[in-house]
Amino acid sequence: MKTDCHFHTNLSDWKFDNAQVIAQAKEKGVKFAICTDHDIINYEFPRLACASWILSYEWVEVSCYDEKNDHHLHFTTYSKKFNWKVTKILENTRNGRKTKILSQIDLLKKNWFKIEENEFYNFFAKKTNIDNLNVSHLSSYILRSPENNTLIKKLTWENLNMEQFLLRCLKIEWDLKHIWAVELKWYEPTIAEFWQVAKQENYIFSLAHPNFKMTQEKFRQRIEYYLNLWVNAVEINILADKDWIELILEFQKKFDFLLTFWSDCHFKTARWEKHWGFWDINPHISQELVNLNLEKLKNKLELN
C-alpha cells in the first residue's frame, strides 16, 4: 500500500493546497496520506482525503527546542486526537515566529533595505499561511528587488543569491550574521514541555529527519537523552544515506523505538530536492520494514 505520513501543504510552505495534494495522491495511488504541516493542525485535509477514499488523520510536525544542547528540532507527532493544550502550544509557536519576522524586517529597514511589512505579507497571503512565514520567504522576497540586490553587493562585495543571503546573512550561525540577523530568545516549546501535554494522549513523537538536523556523531551522543525525554520514534528520511540508516537501526535494535518514514515532501520546485518525492520511501530500506512499523503505529494509536 502506498503511504505517506510526512508531507506539507501551503499551510507550511507556498506551493500546493489541500485539493492539489490530494489530486497528486490519487494520481500516484496513495491510500494512506497524513499531512504534517509545520506547527498547525490541518483539519481540512483528512476530511477531503477521506472523501477521495484516502485514509487520513489530523497530525502535525512540531518545532521544539532542545534546551540542553541549544538545538532546534522538528518532531512529526501522531495522535488519535490532539487536545486544546497542544493547539495552544502550536499557536504560541506561530506567534513567536511572526514576531521574529517582524523584528527581522525592522532591522533590515534600518539597514536601508527596501521592504514593507504589509507588502511582504500581502505578497504571500494568497499562497500560504502567513503565520508560518520564515526567513526563507523573507530572503526570496528581498531579492526580488533590484535595489536590494545592489545594496547587498555594495555591503558584502559579493553577488549573493537567495539561498546564500539566507544562510550567510539571516541565519544566526553564519558568517555575516552580525550585520542583519535577528536573534530572539527561543519561542518553541522544549521537548519536555511538549511531552507534558502530549503524554495525556496516546501519541507518537518522532524525531524528524535527523540527517538534516544533526551530524551522526551528535545523534550518537544525544539519542538516548531524547528517548529519556519520551521521544518514542525516529524518522528515516527519504534522503538519509546508507550509513545514516544503519546508525538509526543500530540504536533502534538497542532501544526498541518505533521507526517512521515518508517523504517530507513540500511540493516545491526541483531545486529544493531534499523536499521532493511524494510517497517515495528511502531506497535503502524495504517496503516490509515500512509496513511493519506502519502497523505498529496504527496499533499504538488504536486506529485499527
Image: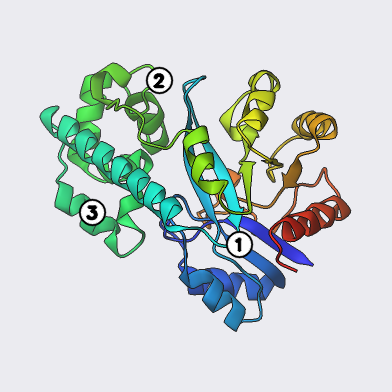
Label 1 to label 3, Cα distance in Å?
A: 34 Å
Instruction: Give the SS element for disc 2.
Output: loop
Instruction: Give the SS element for disc 1.
Output: loop
Q: Residues within 10 Å of mark 1 (few under 14, many from 20)?
A: some
- In the rendered view of the protein, which quadrant contains the C terminus? bottom right
Residue appearing at x 47%, y 24% in the figure: 67
Q: Nearer the viewer, residue 90 or 170?
A: 90
Instruction: Report the residue marked by disc 2.
Output: 174
The reply to whether the C-beta atoms of the residues labelled 2 and 3 are less than 8 Å apart is no
Residue 267 tag number? none
Q: Position of residue 297 (x, y in %)?
A: 73, 55
Q: Position of residue 123 (x, y in %)?
A: 25, 57
Residue appearing at x 61%, y 62% in the figure: 80
Instruction: Report the residue marked by disc 3.
Output: 121
| Res 36 seen here | yes
Q: Nearer the viewer, residue 173 or 87?
A: 87
Q: Nearer the viewer, residue 72 or 8?
A: 72
User: Comparing marks 1 and 2, which lies closer to the viewer?
Assistant: 1
Picture quarter containing residue 75? top right
- In the rendered view of the protein, which quadrant contains the N terminus? bottom right
Looking at the image, is mark 1 or mark 2 earlier in the sequence? 1
* Circle 3: residue type: Tyr
Q: Is residue 112 left or right of residue 12?
A: left
Picture quarter containing residue 22? bottom right
Q: Is residue 5 left or right of residue 151?
A: right
